[in-house]
Image: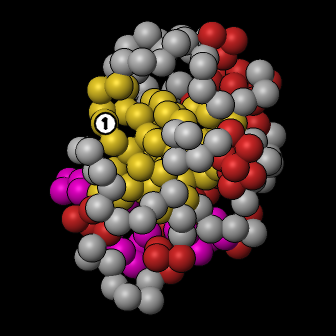
Amino acid sequence: MTLIIPDLSHYEKITIEPAALRTPALINKVSQGSDFSDSTWFNRARDIVQHGELIGGYHFCTNADPSAQVSLFLKDVRNSLGAVVMPQLKLALDWEDYPQAQCSQTQAETMAAAIEVVTGKLPLFYTNLAKYQTITPGSLLLSCDLWLAEYGPTAKVPCQLWQFTDSYGGFEGVNVPCDASKWAADVCSLTDWWAK
């Protein structure tokens, strides 16, 4: 069994109808750098959780001060859901190429460690195959569960979530093509993993 999970941000200018969704989870951007909060996170996160579904929130990493980035990320999550640790919530760091404000591996490691201090668990780690292959052996990032962005027929390395397309149009309740990720198991195993 394979589940497909939508991944949204402010770029998808739509209203989500949780009752119409035919997916057990939704992932949405929360913040970027130290000074950008995604305007769609608050209502989407609150509505999805109130409807009993799983919500994932990710922070887009830049070269801003890591502590300031984590502070913004967790503040925005807490402001929407009232907590940063709950069974329905999965936090993630998004580390990808961003030349105008590139986050270093060391900065990403610092953010992952800071999130673990607050929540008691490492965040899900999103990156593409090329960047994943540059990570230094022994890095804390390799201890995070991997959310791999690699468009094509298969994921080239083992991962927990695989973002396989940026134009999936098959979600009821999400009326535009969007990023989508695969979970290669059933809802019960997804729910158990989401809470870890």
User: Along the line of sight, which residue is nearer the eye, 63 or 93?
Assistant: 93
Q: Is residue 43 left or right of residue 126?
A: right
Residue found at x 64% / y 42%: 186
In-front residue for pair 62/28: 28
Quadrant the C terminus occupies:
bottom right
Q: Is residue 78 left or right of residue 154?
A: right
Q: Is residue 27 visible?
A: no
Residue at the far left: name it: 99
Q: Which quarter of the picture shows residue 165?
A: top left
Q: Residue furthest bottom?
A: 138
Report the span colored magenta.
93-116
27 to the left or right of 152: right
Q: How far across and how far down the image is residue 3, in percent?
A: 54, 36
The image shows residue 145 at horizontal and vertical percentages of 54, 65
Residue type, numbered disc 1: Thr
Q: Nearer the viewer, residue 104 or 172?
A: 172
In the rendered image, residue 133, in percent from the top left (x then y), is placed at 27, 73
